[in-house]
Amino acid sequence: MSKVIYLTDQRAAAAAGDAAPAGTAVLPPAGTAVLPPAGQPALDTRARPLRDLRISVTDRCNFRCTYCMPRDAFDSNHVFLPHAQLLSFEEMARAAAVFVRLGVRKIRLTGGEPLLRKNIETLVGLLAALRTPEGDPLELTLTTNGSLLARKARALKEAGLTRVTVSMDALDPAMFARMSDTDFPVADVLRGIDAAAQAGLAPVKVNMVVRRGVNDDQILPMAAHFRGSGHILRFIEYMDVGSTNGWNMAEVLPSADVIARIGERFPLTPLHTDPMGRVAQRWAYADGAGEIGVISSVTQAFCEGCTRARLSPEGRLFLCLFASRGHDLRALIRGGADDDQLAAAVAGIWAGRGDNYSERRLADTPGAPRDPKVEMSYIGG
Ligand code: SAM
Ligand code: SF4
Ligand code: SF4
């Protein structure tokens, strides 16, 4: 007997408290879906294995970064997801265990601001207890704006977190305030980074989104500050995620230019990067003062090696950062599907994945109609 489960993206309706389904899909009857052979990861249409899972635990944030949650779009009228719509920690951990069975070896918690979710260390503890089929623990990381990190670092480490990534777009306090549109002091983010390293969540990665003509004068000060600190600074090309940030190509500073600017002052040598699952290209300071990375999703698409699935705060599975729709796993989880059925549904969804937005970005007809892309503050980086 097959079971009818709602599988469309009902985010807007759910956020407005309207449970009316916009469409249906059928849960595969037990035993009919293609699960990967034991010990093999699920593969998509381009033979990309399912290896990474990003779980967005909340769509809320205490910052209003201009490139992510511009204040005019995310003001007091914006409807955030009600708590009852969010997956519980137990539901997230159950879903995560299914993904691990299908090949996932690395989980990143994100948001919104993940440290705003109360008792997040409880979720970290549940995920840290998961084991791969070979009996190994997972790599378990978290991306944060750093505002609550000084307070939380030790508890996160004790709960089993492996590492953290902290977003920080400028060293200069005025530019930091302008990029994050908050009055939270950059000095406190720096304290959070140090607290994380001291707690053993090292090496700490620091992500800087670069907007040409806005904060690109911070590239060298940031590089100079983090050189030799043991933290790994990574420069991210400003991306056209979502539909609220008014992105335009003129504000993208290609990573090649970032490397050229830093290399002029501090000579760099390229490090080997594994193409599968790769996000950042790594460079080492020639004088041994550590490494930096660049994430070039606009100028050098890395879809070919993209092994990431994304779970939204209310349990929708997205196959790409630039997707418009997710697959409603919460309906399966709360509808009584057992783990085998859940695994079959996820494997089936992954098997149909052909997403490659970054390879097509510049070829797509500008202005051609398309559904709005999911927001970064909802699905996470
Ligand atoms: N709030 C946390 C933080 O800022 O680290 C986690 C969520 S945030 C959406 C994850 C990452 O996405 C951050 O490093 C942020 O800088 C990055 N990001 C958000 N919008 C972006 C954009 N338009 N282009 C490039 N990176 C972006
Ligand atoms: Fe919040 Fe992170 Fe988005 Fe900034 S990038 S608004 S900190 S979710
Ligand atoms: Fe992966 Fe989509 Fe980014 Fe390509 S555009 S690397 S498929 S998330």
Image: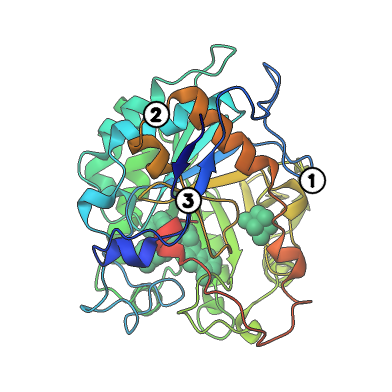
- Name the residue carrying label 1: 46
Q: What mark, if any, has residue 178 been given in the picture?
A: none
- Horizontal and vertical percent for residue 101? 56, 23
Q: Nearer the viewer, mark 1 or mark 3?
A: 3
Q: Which numbered disc, 2 or 3, marks the residue closer to the eye?
A: 3
Q: Ligand 3 closer than 8 Å to the CB at disc 3?
A: no
Picture coordinates of residue 50, whole percent (x, y): 64, 37
Q: Helix, strand, or loop for circle 1?
A: loop
Q: Image height check: is 340 above or below 333? A: above
Residue pointed to by mark 3: 7
Residue in the picture at 25% in, 41% down? 152
Nearer-the-camera pick, 72 or 222: 72
Q: What mark, if any, has residue 94 been given in the picture?
A: 2
Q: Is residue 174 above or below residue 328?
A: below
- Residue 26 relative to residue 50: left or right: left
Q: Secondary structure at mark 3?
A: loop
Mark 2 or mark 3, earlier in chain: 3
Q: Amino acid at mark 2?
A: Arg
Q: In 3D space, how far apart are the residues under numbered discs 2 and 3 (Cα atoms)?
A: 19 Å
Q: Is residue 239 visible?
A: yes
Would you say the residues marked 2 and 3 are in contact, meaning their CB atoms lie under 8 Å apart? no
Pinpoint residue 171: horizontal percent, then vertical percent: 42, 68
Identify the secondary structure beneath mark 2. helix
Residue positioned 55% across, 81% down in the render = 247
Which one is in front, 66 or 264? 66
Q: Is residue 209 visible?
A: no
Query: Going from the N terminus, do you reach mark 2 or mark 1 first?
Result: 1
Q: CA distance from mark 2 to mark 1?
A: 27 Å
